[in-house]
Image (cartoon, grey):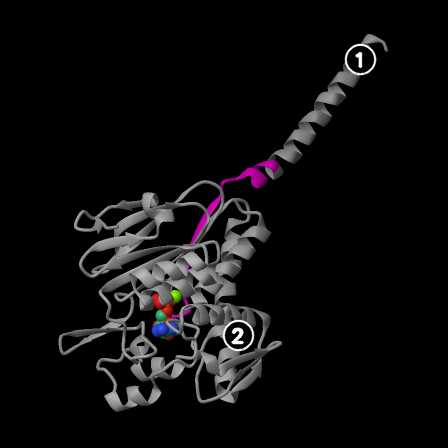
Amino acid sequence: MNRKKLLIFVAAVIVIAAAVFVCIKPVKNYINSKKEYTASGFYMNTYVTANITGAMSEETTNIILTNIDTLEKLCLSKTVEGSDVYKLNEKNSYTVSQPTLDAIVTALDVCEKSGGALDIGIGGLVDLWNVNQGASRPPDEKQISAIKGNRYRNISVSGSEISLSDSSKIDLGSVGKGAACDSARQIAEMSGIKRAVVSIGGSIMLYGEGSFRVGIASPEKGSADYIAAINTSSGFVSTSGTYERFFDYDGVRYHHILNPVTGYPVQNGLASVTVVSDSGILSDALSTACFVLGIEEGKKLAAQYGCQAIFVTDDKKIYSTNGIKNQIEITDNSYILAD
Ligand code: ADP
Ligand code: MG
């Protein structure tokens, strides 16, 4: 190769390399980008926020929010006409879609293992109290007596067909947000994003490497203020609290977590229960069930599912299962960690 040809060859290599660099660079930047996107909405009768980091963060956020809305409207809502649960309650027997079936089957297992503290057949009692829809006084005692008692045993599953053997109405308010967190996680896995925090009311999905810090809401001020933080890795955290939905009547607070057996809101000195799990629906089901059961029985139930639970009492003590004790950091010094 003479000198002129060598120069032409070197120039050609430089031009080709530059072209390749210019073409590849934007793609590489896009794939490696730490783009962060946050969006909020009101779904499942509560505030939902998704914060996502990684390429496709905006698209993934939108898909997650739309999916929560879809799951509510087509599957889990008791009040949206045409959802699986609406039709099931109307017809007493209905072949439901897979997400509804999965939620009901998992919830029924927790109903059984909690001895009926969780009872998804509680729809009639929930409607009677109407706490979620703005009631301002308790219902008549006779009406409560007529409808109270465990109902989940009247729900049977055969394939995808769910049947109700009496006038029980299914209410998935105790598990729906957790189930939606599970589907948010599936979407996060599919999209290849790096990190996601999706909160649906009191249920949170944490996805990605490293640790996350999750606040435990103040029973007095709700989620606007926190009394403690949990340091945890990816997974699910759900809280059930008296402060989320309630009304005061004649000096008594009536909240939305009902004891199916007495027919009245649970009054056992607890202000909230938080459950940490590697399943969204279990964290949600167990936070409600453990609230009804109280500290000792609640700890045993959480252990059966390999989950951790944190109990906050009205007199400002924080109890927990052993596996999470050293991950709790108190941020409001009027609360103390108890054994
Ligand atoms: P949130 O709705 O704030 O997430 P929970 O997960 O604790 O709170 O669920 C409470 C909801 O579940 C109530 O609003 C009601 O619809 C329903 N519910 C109330 N008591 C029970 C119970 N003992 N078992 C099953 N569902 C219940
Ligand atoms: Mg719950």
Q: Is residue 201 above or below residue 328?
A: below
Q: Is residue 32 above or below residue 49?
A: above
Is label 1 in a helix, a strand or a loop?
helix
Image depth: mark 1 or mark 2 in front = 2
Decide which of 310, 169 is in the foreground and name it. Answer: 310
Q: Give the amino acid at mark 2.
A: Leu
84 left or right of 206 in image: right
Q: Position of residue 233 (x, y in %)?
A: 44, 45
Let me know if residue 213 appears in the view.
no
Answer with mark 1 or mark 2, whichever residue precedes in sequence: 1
Count neighbours of disc 1 (C-alpha within 10 A) and say few if under 14, some if 14 to 19, many if 20 or more: few
Residue shown at 46% from the left, 89% from the top = 166
Residue located beneath label 1 in the image: 6
Residue shown at 40% from the left, 59% from the top = 302
Q: Give the amino acid at mark 1.
A: Leu
Q: How many marks?
A: 2
C-alpha span from label 1 to label 2 = 69 Å
Q: Position of residue 229 (x, y in %)?
A: 31, 48
Q: Which residues are the magenta region? A: 28-46
Q: Quadrant of residue 203?
A: bottom left
Count neighbours of disc 2 (C-alpha within 10 A) and say few if under 14, some if 14 to 19, many if 20 or more: some
Residue shown at 35% from the left, 58% from the top = 299
For ligand 1, which image quadrant applies?
bottom left
Residue located beneath label 2 in the image: 74
Decide which of 41, 308 is in the foreground and name it. Answer: 308
Residue lying furthest right: 1
Let me know if residue 128 appears in the view.
yes
Say if the magenta span includes residue 11: no
17 left or right of 224 in image: right
Q: Position of residue 49 (x, y in %)?
A: 40, 57
Is label 2 in a helix, a strand or a loop?
helix
